[in-house]
Image (cartoon, rainbow, N blue to C red):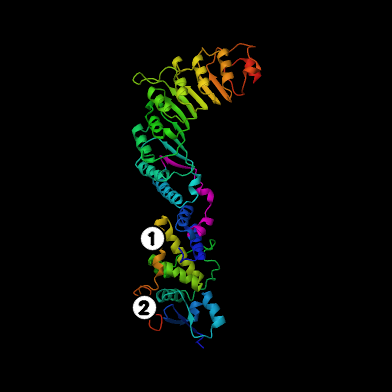
Amino acid sequence: MSDPANITLVTMDGTTFTVPSAYLHRSKLVQDWLRSEGDKQAMEVKHVTPFVLQGVLNFCEIHAEDTSEPLADPADPTKPFEADPRDDAFRGMPDDQLLQFTMAADILQIPELVRLTAQEMASRIDGKSPDQIRAMFNPDDLAEEDVDSDNEMGEVGEEGAISK
Amino acid sequence: MPHLPPEILGHIFRCLKSTSRDPDTDLLAASLVSSLWFMEAWPLIDPALFQVSSLTLKNGPGRLYLIHLIRLSSLLVESLQSGLIHCDHLKSIRIGLVYFGNNLRASAAAIHQVVRLQPPNLRRIEILYSYIRSAAMIELLDIIFPTCDVTKITQLSISGDKTRGNEVTIHLLERLGPTLRDVSLYGFQLDATLLEALRRCHGLECLFAKGGWLPGPDTPPAPSGAVAFLAAALQNLTSLSFSMENCDREARVSDGQLREIVTRLPGLTHLAVDVDFTVNDECLRFVMRHAKEMEVFALVGCIMSREEGVWTENDVGWRGRKVGMSSSFTRLL
């Protein structure tokens, strides 16, 4: 049985990440897994690349101690979005990466990250033509199974420990 | 875009709707990215906002309006190319200009992008101009309606400055004439060139010309009997309304010309013209008997039709307005 204080996530290519379970308390997918299958060694996170999972876990670590109420609806218009300087990395990232983070946030069911990435995508769509939007979020680019690991979000270790 | 699940697209578009400076236009743009994006974005748009019935070229609103017009035109073009319905509501191009501004060429080019794709219901062009030079107006019109394009414009309405001549009107009549069915002129100079241009609009069914002005000595005037001259050339007319501001006798319709008009145009339902003193009750009775389809009939200056008791029910084949007719005729109506 795995250490209950930590959780190990396995990405699509087998890379593992072991992080404190508390980091992922806002992930509904992880919480459901811990309740039903927490006795297993590791949770598979298919369709997520190591690079993207690294970034997601960074986000979760940064916000692990946030005390705000969990978001029920990531696009709730009654709760105005306020940019958090700790999330600046998402605002500067390329469009294709942003798209992958958006999808990872959806897969892991982290409403706060869904909101952040959806808001960022919305701001990039603002004022654009359909052709420009297509060029920004070209679906063919998403077919790539992995992305360059040389990135600003941190290096992925062999065993998946988060670089700090 | 298959990689983004619908629920994520929904989140993105709802964020867009709540934070964008022009949310509906942005959502329209998003809806044109792909069929999946359309399905998620379109329900968030107020359809009434894109029931655009006209594209407008005008002075004044400035750069922001230009940007909006160019973007809206571009999106309408994409809608048309995608077979979507946004352009179905587009019925007219409106041009309201007082002066020539730097942005007008770009605005005209944006409108042309839509016009060239022939939106299914775009049939009308409305022009209101003054002060701006005719050459500048014609330049803009040529951008919107270049000669290489086929248009389906059937209705033309021009309200211009009659003191500046008819160049703009004539240019459009010659450009759009083959498809025109309905022409309205407010303020025109009745000269030979305009008359010829109108006569070449063979498909014309409705001609409304108000506020005509006789030209100065330097311009060849229209020939005497101009209205009858037009009627003779425009065999499809069902509505003819023609009035002048400084009308002399030669521009008025005479007894013989009025008879000729209703004889040549038995399908007339609407006739409103200036007439001279030769039009009397006998002439009117002739009109009644020949113009069986007439519904609206208005003669200005019909001073010779004053007799009582000359009208019978058989004389009146239609009901409608009357101007300057005898009281017995009025009673029958």
Residue flagged by tag 2: what amino acid is it?
Answer: Glu
> Which quadrant, please, contains the N terminus of chain B?
bottom left
Q: Position of residue A163 (x, y in %)?
A: 38, 80
B104 drawn magenta: no
Q: Position of residue B37 (x, y in %)?
A: 48, 59
Residue flagged by tag 1: what amino acid is it?
Answer: Ala
Q: Which mark is residue A89?
A: none
Q: Earlier in the sequence, mark 2 or mark 1?
A: 1
Q: CB under 8 Å between callouts 2 and 1? A: no
Most foreground residue, B53 or B146:
B146
Q: Is residue B238 left or right of residue B33?
A: right
B218 vs A72: above or below = above
Chain part drawn in magenta: B37-60
Q: Classify mark 1: helix, strand or loop.
A: helix
Local packing at callout 1 (Cα closer than 10 Å; few below 14, some 14-19, many 20+) is few
Q: Position of residue B217 (x, y in %)?
A: 35, 18
Residue located beneath label 2 in the image: A155
Q: Position of residue B7 (x, y in %)?
A: 52, 65
Q: Is residue B242 left or right of residue A155?
A: right
Residue located beneath label 1 in the image: A135
* Protein chain holding label 1: A
Q: Is residue A80 visible?
A: no
Q: Quadrant of residue A141?
A: bottom left
Q: Is residue A157 visible?
A: yes
